[in-house]
Amino acid sequence: MRLPVAIFGMLVMFVVAVGVLFFGVLGFTPVQACSGVCFAPFMMSTVGTVVIGLSATFATWFRALREPRAYWPYIGAGLMVALYLVALSVAERVL
């Protein structure tokens, strides 16, 4: 039973990752010349999403002896949404 739940969780995490990446690039790309701090929300939403996605995928499937760990994709999707909300908060202060 864990296998279908894990596969559905991977699909949910993929959809959330695509949404966070889309809105992160769309909303946090600086339009004026800036350095350093103004790239922080952009980097948080792009690099952070990729790192969380790879980590959750690795935690789900690597060395799962009999069945995958089905809860990690959902934790990864939640962390991606939380990271996007933190990046929004940082962008309000920086941009």
Image: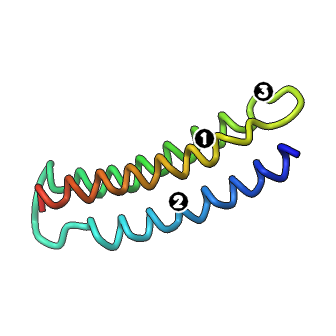
Report, in whole angstroms, how far the alpha carbon at label 3 lies from the one at label 1.
13 Å
Please state which amino acid type lies under the numbered disc 3.
Arg
| 43 relative to 18 in the view: left or right | left
First in sequence, mark 3 or 2: give its number. Answer: 2
Question: Residue sitting at 89 percent across and 30 percent down?
Answer: 66
| 14 relative to 80 in the view: left or right | right
Judge the density around disc 2: few (<14), some (14-19), many (≥20) Cα neighbours within 10 Å. Answer: many
Residue 58 pos. (x, y %): 66, 37
* Disc number for residue 56: 1
Give the structural element (helix, strand or loop) at label 1: helix
The residue to which callout 2 is attached is 17
Please state which amino acid type lies under the numbered disc 2.
Ala
Judge the density around disc 1: few (<14), some (14-19), many (≥20) Cα neighbours within 10 Å. Answer: many
**Quarter holding the C terminus?**
bottom left
- The answer to whether 60 is drawn above or below residue 89 in the figure is above
Report, in whole angstroms, how far the alpha carbon at label 2 lies from the one at label 1.
12 Å
Please state which amino acid type lies under the numbered disc 1.
Ala
First in sequence, mark 2 or 1: give its number. Answer: 2
